[in-house]
């Protein structure tokens, strides 16, 4: 099981933090948090705290954008049929929705295609392009996929189909031979923001099309859908991603919304609420993803494209279907996580490795990615979970900081049928008979690139915050740093010694509730999934050091500040 967390303090230039606090009239706590995040320049910090649409870069700075826009404008003018080819996750679905809707509003004759995870598999395939061409499609635009689709691009060129690839995944050494390739990670692209999600790249194409058509006023409606995909894809929430997420969440909270989006927020219990990154990541995105994981992404597409109020009943039905599929996904996930943990803990040939490669016949392909994430959370090792069907293993990979899972797959490329992704997450296919060979090869690679310290989980602390320093002003400033996520984590503070004055009491047999006091101030706290540490916490009642995040809870019109306990230890 995972070792105890190592507490590490994030470095901070205290002099620069003090200067920033004076320049922007911030509390020392907020200025320190910004400095830790590399935002010690007052202008950069002010832009971070108040992101706006005019902070978005010129989309024409993206390599390939001009060719893509001009070809689509020509297709619209000539009424040539266009197809938007997406992906079956929340990033791909939202990418497809905004590009299809934008093209329709500009007068295009457009359809969409999203592959079925089981029947079609992942990515841009030659057979799909042949099918679309046979249906009279002249132009295909991929979103959130295609950057490694060299074979598909060659086939498109051979049959006279114009292919535009928009993607954000890591490219291969050579780009596909498409009409245009728009990806900020292109080696020859000097676009200033390399971290866009797939929907962010699609949004840049929408932004360019709207600007050239004089329809920039349409952009906010697309931003709020792009925010869902951006937050779902767990990209760094800095630069343009922060603008998309912050502005989009504000728009999602305010409304009004088209009937489909309204039904989705309603089934997630979010209508009328202030929506934050947690709500998207744990309530909205899982429902969208459940469609592609458990049945068909068409359910999510139809829901988000629903705009006519006459479709209200259909939208409620589609949202209900997503909700049911998400429940089924959770059940499947829990069962598979239990099976994977049992194999890892009982079989040294699997569990003793630095990279955990585990799988089985008939494991549901729709949830292997989530299961891989849960395995990483439990064992703090890179994990690859495989679903074996008809002699082929379909796998999803998740990693830990400091270990590029994509680099590891590239080192094992000769034995893989397909692979692609990012440093922290990837997918693959290989022959099932080669799993033992692959497990050995990827662990040989890990042995050369991972040290013992890399496999020791760390809790990164943003500095001390005694209970006396938890003030309304500090809470308000923390709100301006949101939304939190990758590269802008929710701040974790440290306080101690504090006295345990109530509890701990079990909540649903998995969590702990309690209250701590320090220098006359008392705060309630909750520790998620920490029931097994109840005795250790009770034993340290007289004095304990706590690592925590701060949350505001509203109940019956009253707002209170509570601590979410990340860890504790003896002072």
Image: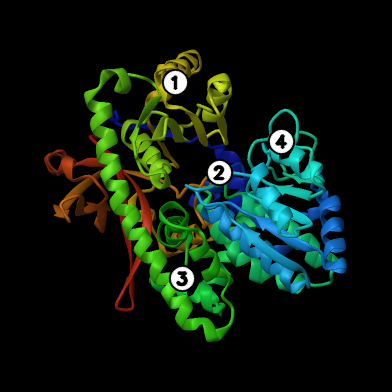
Work out which quarter of the rendered image holds the C terminus and state it.
Answer: top left
Q: Is residue 344 left or right of residue 505?
A: right
Residue at mark 2:
122
Residue at mark 4:
150
Residue at mark 3:
264
Q: Earlier in the sequence, mark 4 or mark 1?
A: 4
Q: Residues within 10 Å of mark 2 (few under 14, many from 20)?
A: some
Q: Earlier in the sequence, mark 3 or mark 2?
A: 2
Q: Earlier in the sequence, mark 2 or mark 1?
A: 2
Residue plotted at (64% across, 43% down): 125
Between the residue at mark 4 and the residue at mark 1, the CA separation in whole angstroms equals 25 Å
Residue plotted at (57% across, 46% down): 236
Check if mark 4's residue and mark 2's residue have beta carbons within 8 Å: no
Element type at mark 3:
helix
Q: Which label belongs to residue 217?
A: none
Examine the image and state in which quarter residue 36 appears: top right
Res. 392 visible in picture: yes
Between the residue at mark 3 and the residue at mark 2, the CA separation in whole angstroms equals 25 Å
Between the residue at mark 4 and the residue at mark 2, the CA separation in whole angstroms equals 14 Å
Query: Is 81 situated above or below 188?
Result: below
Query: Is 402 situated above or below 162?
Result: above
Task: Report x, y in % for residue 320.
Answer: 39, 71
Element type at mark 4:
helix
Residue plotted at (73% across, 73% down): 105
Between the residue at mark 3 and the residue at mark 1, the CA separation in whole angstroms equals 42 Å
In this view, the mark in front (3 or 1): 1
Residue at mark 1:
434
| Front residue of 342 and 140 | 140
Check if mark 4's residue and mark 1's residue have beta carbons within 8 Å: no
């Amino acid at each position: 099981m995972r070792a105890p967390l190592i507490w590490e303090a994030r470095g901070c230039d205290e002099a620069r933090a003090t200067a920033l606090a004076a320049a922007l009239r911030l509390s020392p706590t907020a200025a320190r948090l910004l400095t830790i995040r590399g935002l010690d320049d007052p202008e950069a910090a002010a832009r971070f705290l108040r992101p706006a649409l005019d902070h978005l870069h010129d989309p024409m700075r993206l390599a390939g954008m001009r060719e893509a826009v001009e070809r689509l404008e020509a297709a619209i003018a000539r009424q040539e049929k266009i197809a938007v080819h997406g992906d079956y996750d929340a990033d791909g679905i939202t990418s497809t929705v905004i590009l299809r809707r934008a093209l329709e509003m500009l007068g295009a004759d457009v359809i969409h295609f999203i592959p079925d995870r089981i029947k079609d598999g992942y990515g841009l395939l030659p057979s799909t392009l042949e099918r679309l061409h046979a249906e009279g499609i002249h132009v295909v635009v991929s979103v959130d996929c295609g950057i490694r689709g060299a074979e598909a691009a060659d086939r498109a060129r051979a049959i006279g189909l114009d292919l535009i690839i928009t993607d954000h995944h890591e490219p291969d050494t050579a780009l596909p031979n498409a009409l245009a390739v728009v990806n900020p990670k292109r080696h020859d692209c000097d676009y200033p923001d390399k971290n866009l999600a797939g929907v962010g790249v699609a949004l840049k194409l929408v932004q360019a099309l709207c600007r050239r058509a004089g329809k920039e006023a349409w952009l906010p409606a697309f931003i709020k859908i792009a925010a869902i995909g951006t937050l779902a894809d767990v990209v760094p929430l800095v630069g343009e991603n922060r603008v998309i997420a912050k502005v989009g969440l504000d728009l999602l909270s305010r409304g009004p919304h088209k009937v489909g989006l309204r039904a989705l927020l309603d089934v997630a219990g979010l209508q009328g609420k202030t929506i934050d990154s947690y709500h998207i990541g744990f309530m909205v995105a899982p429902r969208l993803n459940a469609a592609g994981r458990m049945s068909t992404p068409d359910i999510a597409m139809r829901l988000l494209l629903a705009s006519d109020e006459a479709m209200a009943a259909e939208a409620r039905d589609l949202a209900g279907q997503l909700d049911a599929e998400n429940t089924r996904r959770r059940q499947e996930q829990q069962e598979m996580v239990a099976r994977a943990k049992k194999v890892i803990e009982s079989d040294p040939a699997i569990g003793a490795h630095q990279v955990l490669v585990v799988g089985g016949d008939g494991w549901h392909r729709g949830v292997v990615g989530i299961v891989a994430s849960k395995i990483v959370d439990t064992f703090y090792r890179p994990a690859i979970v495989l679903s074996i069907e008809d002699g082929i293993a379909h796998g999803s990979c998740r990693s830990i900081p400091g270990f590029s899972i994509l680099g590891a797959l590239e080192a094992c490329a000769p034995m893989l049928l397909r692979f692609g992704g990012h440093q922290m997450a990837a997918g693959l296919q290989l022959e099932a008979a080669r799993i033992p060979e692959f497990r050995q090869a990827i662990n040989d690679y890990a042995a050369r690139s991972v040290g013992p310290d890399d496999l020791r989980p760390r809790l990164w602390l943003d500095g001390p915050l005694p209970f006396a320093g938890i003030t309304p002003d500090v809470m308000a400033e923390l709100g301006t740093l949101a939304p939190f996520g990758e590269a802008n984590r929710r701040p974790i503070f440290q306080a101690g010694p504090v006295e345990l004055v109530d509890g701990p009491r079990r909540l649903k047999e998995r969590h702990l509730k309690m209250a701590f006091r320090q220098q006359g101030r008392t705060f309630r706290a909750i520790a998620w999934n920490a029931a097994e540490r109840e005795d250790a916490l009770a034993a340290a009642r007289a004095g304990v050091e706590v690592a925590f995040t701060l949350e505001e809870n509203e109940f019956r019109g009253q707002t209170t500040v509570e601590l979410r306990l990340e860890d504790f230890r003896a002072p």
